[in-house]
Image (spheres, grey):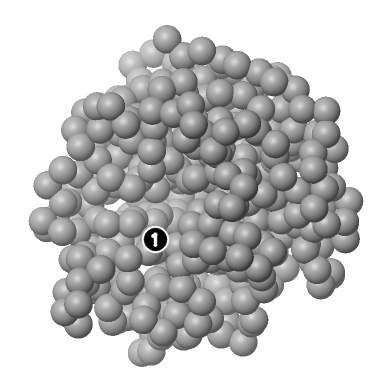
Amino acid sequence: MNHFIRITLASIILLAATSPARASFTVDTIVNSDATQIASAYVYVPTFGLELHRVVYRDGDTHELKMASSIKTTGAWSAWHISTIAPETAHTPAIEISKDDGTTFIAYQDGDGDLMLAYLAICLGNNCPGLQQVPIDQGTTRGQYPSLTLVYNDNGELDQIHTAAIEGDPGAIQPNSARVRHSYCDSWPNCESNNDWTSADAPMGKPGPYKTAIGNDHSGINGSPLVRILATMGDGVRMTTWSIYGPSYSNSTTLLTTRRGHLSYGGFNTTGRQLSIATGTDVYFLSGLNGSGTAELVSASGQGGAFSDVTFDSNDFHVVAFNRDTNDDVIIGRRHLSGSSWSRISIPDAGSVGRYVTVHEDQDRDLLIVYRDGTNDRIRIARGD
C-alpha cells in the first residue's frame, strides 16, 4: 500500500534574487519503495474537465515498469494510484499524455531490446479498454534513451505519435555502432500493430550515451509542421527535422550547441520550444532551437548534475529544474522571457534528492516537481504555489 506523507515547507532557500521566487512548496511521497528511471507527464483535459499527473518508473526490486497516477477535478489532487505497465525488465521510459482525450503513451525498451509503446485511455464509465502494448521498433539493441512527442491536427485532435531512441551501444568506440532511430505512426488511433509504424535511421551520425529529445511545433507557435529530433553527438547537440506533411528529413543537421549531455525538450515560449542540457556538472538552457542561440548557464558553474527538465510557465518565465550533485538537492532556475539572468531556489528536502527530476505547471499555476529520494529509496513530489 502506498503511504502518503506530507511535509509543509514554510520557506525556500533563495540563491539568487533577480526575479520573484515562488513562496512555498509542499513535499509529498508518491512511491515509498525503491524506484529508478523516473519520468512524468501532466495535462489538462477539457473534455473531462480534469487534470491528470502520471509518473512512470522502473521498480528497483522487481524491474517492472510501473505508473503512479493522480487526478484533480475539484481543486485537490487525489491519492496516488499505482499500476503495472510492463511485468518484465524495462528501461528508460518516456511518457506523454494527450490533451485531446487524456490517453497516456509510454515508450520504453523491453528486456529483448525492442522499443515498445504502451498506451492507456481515460475511461470514466463501464467496459473500459485496458492497457495496450505494441512493439514499434524491434531489434536486440533498439529503444535506448527514448523520447516521445504527440502531434495534433488543426482541430486539436491527436493525429500522429513520434519517438526517437538510440540503437546500438552509444558508448562503444566503433564509429557506426550507434545511431538515432525515428519511429512514427501518422494515423492515430490506427497504431495498434507494428505494421502501423514506420521506423528509420535519422540522418544524424553516431550519438553519445545520452537521452534523446523529440518534439514538434505543429498547432503551436507559428504552426510549424516539423518534428524536431535532437541527440548529443561527438561535437555537441545536433538537430534534424522531419516534415509532417512530406514526409521527409532535412538534408543536414543543425549544431545547436557544443555542450554535451542528457536532453529535455520543454514547453512553448514565444519563439518555439526550449531545451535543457544536463552535462553532469552544469545545466544549460537553449531557446528557439534555430541554430543561432547561445546555451545559457542555469546552474552556478560546477553546481549542476546529470538530470534536468524545462517548461515555460504562465507568468512568462522559463523554468528549469535540475539536480545539484554537490549538495544532493533539487534546484529550480527561473528567468523571465524578457530578462537576462537566472534566479535559483532550492527545495530543502532532506537526503540525497533530485535525480530524474521533472517539472510541469498545473491549472492553478503550481509547479509540479517530481524527483527521486536516493537516501530513502522513494519518489517525491514538490508542489509550489
Which residue is found at the position 65% from the left and 33% from the top?
349
Residue 194 at x, y = what percent? 17, 51
Position of residue 220 in the picture relative to residue 58 (left or right):
right
> Dividing the image into 4 quarters, which one contains the N terminus?
top left
Which residue is found at the position 48% from the left and 46% from the top?
356
Which residue is found at the position 77% from the left and 63% from the top?
342
Residue 54 at x, y = what percent? 49, 33
Residue 364 visible at all: no
* Residue 168 versus residue 48 in the image, above or below: below
Position of residue 137 in the picture relative to residue 67 (left or right):
left
Q: Quadrant of residue 341?
A: bottom right
For the image, the number of numbered tags is 1
The secondary structure type at the circle numbered 1 is loop
Residue 87 at x, y = what percent? 21, 28
Position of residue 79 in the picture relative to residue 74 (left or right):
left
Q: Nearer the viewer, residue 220 or 264?
A: 264
Which residue is found at the position 65% from the left and 68% from the top?
301
* Residue 52 versus residue 291 in the image, above or below: above
Residue 321 visible at all: yes
* Residue 206 versus residue 324 in the image, above or below: below
Q: Residue furthest bottom?
A: 251
Q: What amino acid type should be assigned to the residue bearing mark 1? A: Lys
Residue occupied by mark 1 = 211
Q: Nearer the viewer, residue 81 or 324?
A: 324
Q: Residue furthest top?
A: 1
